[in-house]
């Protein structure tokens, strides 16, 4: 399967829509790092992204804010 662009990632998954938000997820939450086709074109492995979301099934993701399902009264 080909790699996903940032636009495809945003359309298909509940991820932050901004570059700083994605960088924060990579740094603080362990979101998969992209590979770069060139300096302005990050690409993500669909398998790595899917695996990352599956490993966090107990969490709710909301555009850069992460809360545990138990915290949502």
Image (cartoon, rainbow, N blue to C red):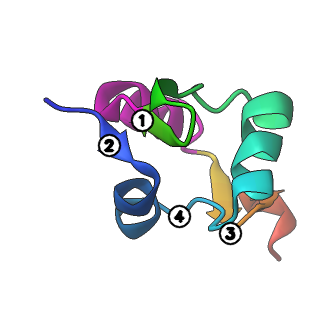
Tags 1 and 2 touching, CB below 8 Å: yes
The residue that mark 1 highlights is: 43
Q: Nearer the viewer, mark 2 or mark 3?
A: 2
Q: Could you say which quadrant of the image residue 54 lies in?
A: top left
x and y percentages locating residue 33 in the rendered image = 59, 25
Within-10-Å neighbours for mark 4: few <14, some 14–19, many 20+: some
| Dot 4: element | loop
Q: Name the mark on residue 14.
A: 4
x and y percentages locating residue 62 in the rendered image = 68, 69
Point out the tag, 2 or 4, that comes first from the N-terminus: 2
| Dot 1: element | strand
x and y percentages locating residue 36 in the rendered image = 48, 26
Residue drawn at point x = 70 percent, y = 55 percent: 19
Point out the tag, 1 or 2, that comes first from the N-terminus: 2
Q: Which residues are magenta?
A: 44-57
Point out the tag, 3 or 4, that comes first from the N-terminus: 4
**Above-or-below relation of 73 to 11:** below
| Dot 3: element | strand
Q: Could you say which quadrant of the image residue 67 lies in?
A: bottom right
Disc 2 versus disc 4: distance between alpha carbons?
14 Å
In the image, farthest residue toward the left: 1
The residue that mark 3 highlights is: 62
Disc 1 versus disc 2: distance between alpha carbons?
5 Å
Is residue 54 magenta-colored? yes
Tags 3 and 4 touching, CB below 8 Å: yes
Q: Is residue 8 left or right of residue 38?
A: left
Disc 2 versus disc 3: distance between alpha carbons?
20 Å
């Amino acid at each position: 399967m080909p790699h996903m662009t940032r636009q495809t990632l945003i359309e298909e998954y509940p991820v932050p829509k901004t570059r700083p938000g994605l960088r924060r997820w990579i740094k603080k939450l362990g979101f998969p790092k992209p590979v770069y086709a060139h300096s302005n074109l990050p690409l993500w492995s669909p398998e790595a992204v899917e695996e990352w979301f599956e490993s966090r099934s107990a969490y709710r993701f909301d555009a850069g804010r992460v809360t545990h399902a138990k915290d949502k009264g």
